[in-house]
Image (cartoon, grey):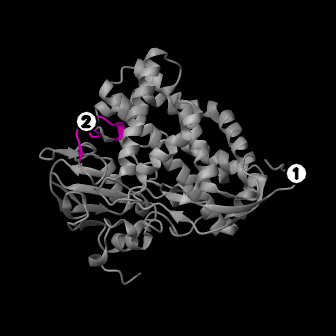
Amino acid sequence: MDDLGLDDIDLVSLDGFAAGFPHAVFAALRREAPVWWHPPHPKAPGGEGFWVVSRHSETLAVLRDPESFSSEGAQGRAGGGTTLDDLPRGLGPGAMLNMIDPPRHTALRGLVNPAFKPRTIARLEHELRGRTRAILHGVSGGRCDFLRDVAAELPLQVIASLLGIPQADRHQIFEWTTAFVDYADRDLGESSARLAAAGAGIGAYGRERIAAKRARPGDDLLSVAIAGGVRDEELLPLVSLLLVAGSETTRNAIAGGLLALIEHPAELAALRAALARGDGAVVASAVEEILRWTSPTAYNRRTATRDVELAGQAIRAGDKVTHWYPSANRDEAVFAEPDRFRVARVPNPHLAFGHGAHHCLGASLARTEIRVVLEELLPRWAEIELAGPVEWARSNKHTGMRHLPVGFRLAPGEAAG
């Protein structure tokens, strides 16, 4: 696709993302127009054009300047937020943690941040390992849908535990969160019966759980948030955000990581060898490479609050500005051989978790979950192969899968479920 022209690029029509992230398109943007004005499009929310930031350096510049690039919105706009849709204030912007600017963002994040600090997550590792082993032992017959049967299970179980939610509810949560992030039955800016049902379901469920925790608080994250004084109008958006972000992105990193290892057998062998000799450094670098390679959040949006210049382009106050993590994470100016998957890649300054004020709250938890899955799965499954076509979600906001069919053979001495 070296002859791809800028006039051919369409980041609004979701069919262009139905086979995974279109890396060739963004290679052309990095090369020819690293800060590019996407022209107005009939399928874009509001029909508006928007800026596309594709390189690592400019993405960092946006993330480091929340005063110029707001997560909430800007004067003159009725809505804002981190998607191309202009969400009404109070629905997301100004209420949901990832759509609030400092200083309120700093205060709200400080209330829930202790539950996600590395030291806290380290104390959870024994539980994570036990859950992972149980999940793997529950997969039998030498074949499974890895996305649903393994990759989705651990993050769902963990976020349910952290929020004090009954484990029996986790599969319903999976269906709701999937409806939000997979545009299977709609285009940008559109709704559907499935999406409406998911929104109503997760809203009612969140209110029910908040009421239950007010009546009988525990030591879970939701009880802590209530006791810490999180405002009523911020509680339900916080629960919704944690349910989606705490399950969806990590499951796609785990599934995408296994797919990358299957497609790069030499790297899989190198990781197996590192695990066998107890080389924690290579295992840790493999986790970072999986995060760089998969980059489950495709883009986030900001709104320019004032006229500003970026890479020679004049961005006007009120413009929508999107920055694309999978593209920044394959920037040739930052990563040697960016289109090669290397488990021992060091350094690896990827931006899969964002940067600055909105650096992913659950980064330490996600890293630990990915590492534990690798440490438990690879010694147990001696051979792994694709057992059918990968089915990707249809979304330009989240790079995820619907199904990842794999076949496997247990290692000698490993008992079937």
Looking at the image, the residue that sits furthest to the front is 193
Q: Position of residue 306 (x, y in %)?
A: 15, 49
Secondary structure of residue under mark 2: loop
- Tag shown at residue 413: 1
Q: Tell me if residue 416 can be seen.
A: yes
Magenta includes 95? Answer: yes
- 84 horizontally vs 388: left or right: left
The answer to which of 293 and 173 lies nearer the viewer is 173
Q: Position of residue 333 (x, y in %)?
A: 42, 66
Q: Tell me if residue 118 can be seen.
A: no
Query: Which residue corresponds to mark 2?
Result: 90
Q: Position of residue 222 (x, y in %)?
A: 46, 26
Residue depicted at x 34% and y 53%? 192
Which of the 4 quarters of the picture holds residue 319? bottom left
Residue 326, placed above or below residue 131? below
- 380 horizontally vs 114: left or right: right
- Type of amino acid under label 1: Gly
Residue 305, placed above or below residue 326? above
Which of the 4 quarters of the picture holds residue 186? bottom left
Residue depicted at x 63% and y 51%? 149
> What kind of secondary structure does the magenta stretch mostly adopt?
loop
Magenta includes 151? Answer: no
Q: Position of residue 295 (x, y in %)?
A: 48, 56
| Region rendered in magenta | 87-98
The answer to which of 398 and 358 lies nearer the viewer is 398
- Type of amino acid under label 2: Gly
Residue 314, placed above or below residue 168? below
Mark 1 or mark 2, which is nearer the start of the sequence? 2
Secondary structure of residue under mark 1: loop
The answer to which of 411 and 358 lies nearer the viewer is 411
Residue depicted at x 35% and y 53%? 60
